[in-house]
């Protein structure tokens, strides 16, 4: 990981998160929608002087800055495996003219939470999003669940805790069966030789 990919997002996040929304060159609002979140949920309370905790957390955890400006953490290809439910976040970006940047969030992907931003979206007057795929941390899944996302894992938790025990017994039985067959065969052949 390059120094630029570490320092730039931290400095940009600090500027975005500490400045009042009207003065910051960043998202002044974010709206998320998807399974379990209906109607669409505004991430910033209009009464907030800053971008607020929900919008700040989404900016930080979703890789928004990396996807806006591009860095080593963004990939061109999606991760392998199932992506799961898709949530759409639309960020209002303040500049001379307001622009809306769209990001797709997949909090329940089998490889862990990921986001995707289409490249080339306009923001900040003449800016264009770098776009791409960003591998997020577990905090993004927790954040989206906190907004009301319909979690697919709630119905699977019981099955997951039972499956390893059942699988372990099955493997033990399968491993012991050939050894038992060899012992029986040796006893049988040993008895015939006498």
Image (spheres, grey):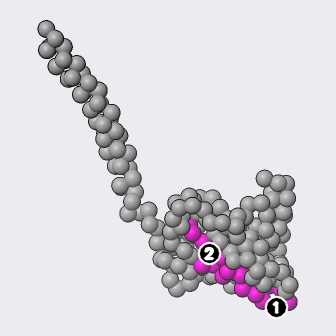
Q: Residue at x 78, y 53 (%)?
A: 1
Is 173 on the left or on the right of 117, as rendered? left
Residue 104 covered by magenta stretch = yes
Neighbour class for label 2 at 10 Å: few (<14), some, many (≥20)? many
Q: Element at badge 2?
A: strand
Residue 65 covered by magenta stretch = no
Name the residue carrying label 1: 97
Per the rendered image, the range of residues in magenta is: 88-108
Q: Element at badge 1?
A: loop
Question: Which residue is at the far bottom?
Answer: 97
Residue 143 appears in the picture as rendered: yes
Dominant secondary structure of the magenta stretch?
Answer: strand
User: Residue 130: horizontal and vertical position, in percent?
Assistant: 77, 73
Q: Residue at x 49, y 77 (%)?
A: 35
Q: Residue at x 50, y 68 (%)?
A: 84
The C terminus appears in which quarter of the rendering?
A: top left
Position of 112 relative to 67 (above/below) = above
- State how many labels appear: 2
Mark 2 and mark 1 in contact (Cβ < 8 Å)? Answer: no
User: Residue 11: horizontal and vertical position, in percent?
Assistant: 84, 64
Q: CA distance from mark 1 to mark 2?
A: 23 Å
* Quadrant assignment, res 183: top left
Q: Residue at x 60, y 79 (%)?
A: 88
Neighbour class for label 1 at 10 Å: few (<14), some, many (≥20)? few
Is 70 on the left or on the right of 136, as rendered? right
Q: Nearer the viewer, mark 1 or mark 2?
A: 2
User: Residue 156: horizontal and vertical position, in percent?
Assistant: 39, 60
Is 12 on the left or on the right of 138, as rendered? right
Residue 10 appears in the picture as rendered: no
Position of 1 relative to 12 (above/below) = above
* Quadrant assignment, res 192: top left
């Amino acid at each position: 990981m390059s120094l630029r990919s570490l320092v730039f997002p931290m400095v940009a996040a600090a500027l975005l998160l500490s400045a009042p929304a009207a003065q910051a060159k960043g998202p002044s609002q974010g709206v998320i929608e998807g399974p379990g979140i209906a109607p669409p949920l505004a991430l910033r309370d209009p009464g907030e002087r800053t971008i607020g905790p929900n919008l700040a957390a989404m900016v930080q955890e979703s890789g928004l800055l990396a996807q806006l400006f591009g860095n080593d953490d963004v990939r061109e290809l999606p991760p392998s495996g199932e992506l799961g439910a898709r949530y759409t976040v639309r960020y209002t970006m303040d500049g001379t003219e307001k622009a809306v940047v769209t990001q797709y969030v997949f909090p329940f992907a089998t490889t862990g939470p990921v986001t995707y931003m289409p490249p080339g979206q306009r923001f900040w007057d003449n800016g264009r999003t770098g776009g791409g795929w960003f591998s997020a941390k577990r905090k993004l899944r927790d954040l989206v669940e906190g907004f009301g996302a319909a979690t697919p894992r709630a119905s699977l938790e019981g099955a997951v805790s039972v499956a390893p025990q059942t699988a372990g017994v099955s493997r033990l039985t399968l491993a012991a069966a050939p050894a038992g067959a060899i012992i029986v065969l040796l006893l049988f052949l040993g008895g015939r030789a006498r």
